[in-house]
Structures are given as C-alpha cells and as structure tokens.
Amino acid sequence: MRPAQPPDLPSVPAPPQHPHHRQPGDGWVECACGRRHWGLFGAAGLLLARYPDGRTGGAPDAIVLQHRAPWSDQGGTWGVPGGARNPDEPAVDAALREAAEEAGIDPADVVVLGTSVLHHPDWSYTTVLARERVPGAVEPAVTDPESVEIRWVRVGDVEALPLLPAFAEAWPDLLGRLTAGA
C-alpha cells in the first residue's frame, strides 16, 4: 500500500539549495520600528543611472533595477541591487560589492555621485547614487539566485513596476537627487 499523498497546497518558493556566499554582516535585525531588517551592520544598495549624454545634470534615461527572487524578503518586488554591510565596511564599498555580486556590475565602471541614508532606530540603509563611467558600458546581469531579473529600466517606467515599498517611497527624492547631479 502506498502512503497517502499530502493534500495539494499552494507552492511557496524556497531558497536555492546551492551554497551562498555568507558574509559576516548577514543576519536579521529586530528593529524598534516593528520590522526586521536584513544586515546586522545595516545595508546598502547601488542606484546606477544612465544619462543621455553620459554626464550628470538633468534627468537620467534609465536606472538599474533588480527583480527580487520570490523566496527573498519582499520577494517579487523591484529595487536596487544591494544587501548587508560587513563589520566596519563603508556603505559605498558595500553597495559596490553587492552590485558586483548580484548584477555583475564592475565597480570600475561606476562613478559615485552621493548617498542617501534611511535611518531606523536600530538599523540603516544607504542608497549609493551613481552613474556609468562610460555611457553604455554597464550591462547588468543576474549573477546569483537572489534575482529573477536585473536590467536597465527607463525612468518613466519605474513607477509602473511593483517596487519594494521602501524604494517606492524614496524614489521621488532619489530621482530628484539624480536629476540635480546628486
């Protein structure tokens, strides 16, 4: 006699079973704001912009966005490539490292324009605003299992995507800073 089959349950995507490069900053912080956040020492992400003439000033044409894997925190949403900071790691270094790990973006192809910090009682997230060093040189790609897709998104199309809530809230200010040259 065969064992009874379990009832059909909705499938919940699971994290990949292959090794993931753990970092010393990986882990959850229970924040006094009532949420938990990824990154024992905070987190950082890269908001990379492509400008029509390659120079800052004026609105960018497009930005690099990551479609987060369904199994990840707030999976299925779009945001910037980023993640946990390591102990004593500057936010800019963390954002560039994470963009290289998750999107194949070479830090040498990026010019940092500034930062924007979201402060919580027990945690912070730094968005590093940047542009391509050479227009058209960066072709982001999915390079780890944390992403469904990574691509350039036209600025006018950003708000039509299901954005990570914190990114959606910050986007108007971030776009203003990119337009002003950060």
Image: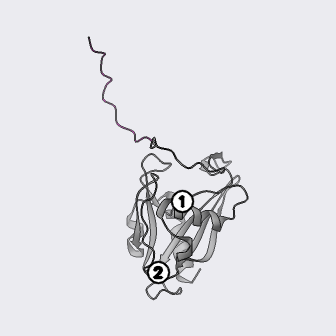
Which residue in the rendered view is the most extreme toward the right? 88
**Which of the image's four quarters has the N terminus?**
top left
When the figure is inspected, residue 6 is found, relative to residue 173, above or below; the finding is above
Q: Position of residue 8 (x, y in %)?
A: 30, 29
Q: How many marks?
A: 2
Part of the protein shown in magenta = 1-14
Report the predominant secondary structure element of the magenta stretch: loop
Q: Position of residue 135 (x, y in %)?
A: 45, 83
Residue under circle 1?
A: 166
Q: Looking at the rendered structure, which numbered label has been put on residue 60?
A: 2
Residue 123 occupies which quadrant of the picture?
A: bottom right
Please tell me which of labels 1 and 2 falls first in the chain.
Answer: 2
Q: Looking at the rendered structure, which numbered label has been put on residue 146?
A: none
Q: Nearer the viewer, residue 106 or 113?
A: 106
Query: What separation in Å lies between label 1 and label 2 (alpha carbons)?
Result: 21 Å
Q: Residue at x 31, y 15 (%)?
A: 3
When the figure is inspected, residue 115 is found, relative to residue 81, above or below; the finding is below
**Which of the image's four quarters has the C terminus?**
bottom right
Is label 1 in a helix, a strand or a loop?
helix
Residue 94 occupies which quadrant of the picture?
A: bottom right
When the figure is inspected, residue 115 is found, relative to residue 75, above or below; the finding is below
Q: Residue at x 63, y 52 (%)?
A: 39
* Residue 99 seen: yes
Q: Amino acid at mark 1?
A: Ala
Q: Position of residue 56 (x, y in %)?
A: 53, 85
Contact (CB < 8 A) between labels 1 and 2? no
Q: Nearer the viewer, residue 133 or 78?
A: 133
Does the stretch in magenta take in 32?
no
Which residue in the rendered view is the most extreme toward the left? 1
Residue 61 occupies which quadrant of the picture?
A: bottom left
